Image (tube, rainbow, N blue to C red):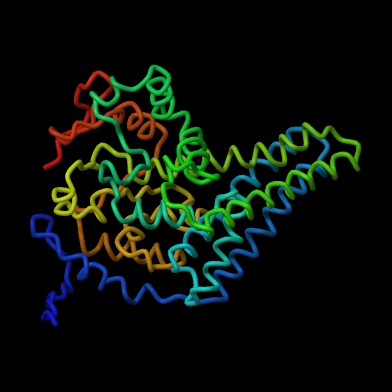
Amino acid sequence: MPEAILIPATHSAVAPDAAMPHRKVIRAWLIPLSTRVTLYPLLLLIFDYVVLLAALAGTVLFAHWLAKLACGVAAGFMMGRAFIIGHDACHQSLTPHRRLNKWLGRIAFLPSLTPYSLWDVGHNVVHHGYTNLKGFDFVWAPHTQREFSELTSTRRALDRVYRSGWAPGLYYMIEVWWLRMIYPSRRYMPTRRTVFLLDNLLVTAYAALWIGALWFVAAATGQSVALILLMGFAVPFLFWCAMIGFVVYVHHTHTSVSWHAERSAWSKAQPFVSTTVHLTFALRIGSVLHHIMEHTAHHVDMSVPLYRLRQAQAKLEEMLPGRIIIQKFSWRWYFDTARKCKLYDFNAHCWTDYKGRPTSVAAA
């Protein structure tokens, strides 16, 4: 039996010019914050579902189309909040109970029409296992200039739209949800598992029930079926796609965030710290999003529940000053990032525009 490797603990802040501590040391700082409870997340999920259903009811009960639209947008936002709870459950960090987490995850994922088991593979195994490693992590993976030139004209145009800053929702809806989640082909999911089909059937049944209920209520109240389906189904779903597309984009796209083509270089770069962004907002908006923007802590230790991520992120920033990318959100920063982060030069280790001109400082 091989001898255990003893890794010395670090109890004081690590100097910016010192070697990065081993991941086990960093995770040890967060152990006190990885304890999970059962009642609180259950209450969170119940609250989010109640508000979601109330918002959907508003798309039917209010007479003016603007009020219906506002309720549809609110429903989409609550779908996002429920999804974040499901995301935690899928990581087994929501409650201490593994089986309960699986069912809570499925319930929380239903409003966003997300098949639990397929998200588990794409997110937990691929994204978290190989964050920003080209050829493995597919989420917002940038093309090189040569790869971009070899794309069809349609795919080049689509990439320009995706990375314009205006269409993160379109990217998520097509590239993640439609191609990799909803009855994916073997090209996008070579592995065939019964649970994938069952979760897709569950999502399909939920969508049919959702649409059918709206159709029935519209007909029963003498309202336009098309209008009710637009406000009560299409608007919430499209808003949700825009919300998740934006969140995933800003988590891992930044002029200071590097991508890697070689696994050895990627591993040396401590990707669990260097490939994520802590995006901060005014008015405690991060709290409204169940602290999902405290993303560095989540990537360092996925067992930290969402209701302790704020403390975990603060601990990391205290212990690793100058190492974590912290970005104050503004629309100017967001669109500047979208303008600069088009393609990636893996030789120079920097972002470029579509003409291959560097737009960021080369990574060390």
Q: Give above or below for 73 relative to 304.
A: above
The image quarter containing residue 40 is bottom right
**In the visual, does 342 lie left or right of 64?**
left
Q: Is residue 299 visible?
A: yes
**In the visual, does 33 lie left or right of 25?**
right
The image quarter containing residue 256 is top left
Q: Residue furthest left?
A: 18
**In the visual, does 269 lie left or right of 40?**
left
Q: Residue at x 47, y 40 (%)?
A: 245
Q: Residue at x 65, y 47 (%)?
A: 75
Using the image as rendered, state which of residue 59 and residue 198 is in the foreground: 198
Where is residue 11 drawn, in percent x and y? 18, 74
Q: Is residue 78 visible?
A: no
Using the image as rendered, state which of residue 150 and residue 12 is in the foreground: 150
Q: Give above or below for 148 relative to 84.
A: above
Quadrant where the N terminus sits is bottom left
Q: Residue at x 39, y 26 (%)?
A: 159
Where is residue 131 drawn, in percent x and y? 30, 50
Using the image as rendered, state which of residue 355 and residue 174 is in the foreground: 174
Q: Residue at x 65, y 48 (%)?
A: 204
Where is residue 212 drawn, in percent x and y? 78, 45
**In the visual, does 147 lie left or right of 36?**
left
| Number of numbered discs overlaid on the protein picture | 0
Where is residue 267 drawn, in percent x and y? 18, 54
Quadrant where the C terminus sits is top left
